[in-house]
Image (cartoon, rainbow, N blue to C red):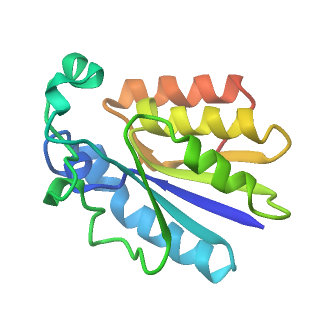
Amino acid sequence: MKLLAVIDMQNDFIDGALGTAEAVQIVGRVAEKISSIRESGAEVVFTRDTHGEDYLSTSEGKKLPVEHCVRGTYGWEITDKLEVRDSKIIDKPTFGSYELAEYAASIEKLEEVILVGLCTDICVISNAMLLKARLPEVRITVDSGCCAGVTPQSHENALEAMKMCQIDVE
């Protein structure tokens, strides 16, 4: 069994408050990846960065003072260019999600978790590391062509760091 974890493909990270040209460029590839994974019988789960109106007063907000992904706003929504269907959506208040790791651990005969999404150097790497720690014998893979970082350099740095932690990067 395989699980595709689509990390934070939300409007604010694509072309909104924290959007980048690189994020815009991966949307079509992520849509294709979701479609092909579903056709193979694998499951798809989405994460959604989720903040409240008090974001700017939080620890994260003080270090990244750009309001984004506030629950209920357009920026918080997963882009409508991706087919969510009836997939599980995990709202996460911080970079990594224990809930995602526990959900993956609950899947019988899980062989691989594949991660795609945004941002490689913050939320993708955080979730990959949590998954690797929780499921050390399960293959954790990051599809680098379906990820984008804050900058191209930080994207590459994150991929190299994940390789060093025995996360497969394709």
Q: Is residue 90 above or below residue 32?
A: above
x, y percent for residue 32: 47, 71
Give the residue at x 52% y 77%: 35
Give the residue at x 14% y 57%: 73
Say left or right for 3 vs 59. Answer: right
x, y percent for residue 99: 56, 48
> Which quadrant does the N terminus fall into?
bottom right
Q: Is there any visible trace of residue 65 in the rendered image?
A: yes
x, y percent for residue 66: 14, 30
Q: Is residue 84 above or below residue 66?
A: below
x, y percent for residue 113: 68, 53
Q: Nearer the viewer, residue 71 or 11?
A: 71
Q: Is there any visible trace of residue 170 in the rendered image?
A: no
Give the residue at x 40% y 24%: 154
Give the residue at x 27% y 72%: 80
Q: Is residue 53 above or below residue 71?
A: above
Say left or right for 64 vs 37. Answer: left
How many badges with numbers are in the image?
A: 0
Say left or right for 107 vs 157. Answer: right
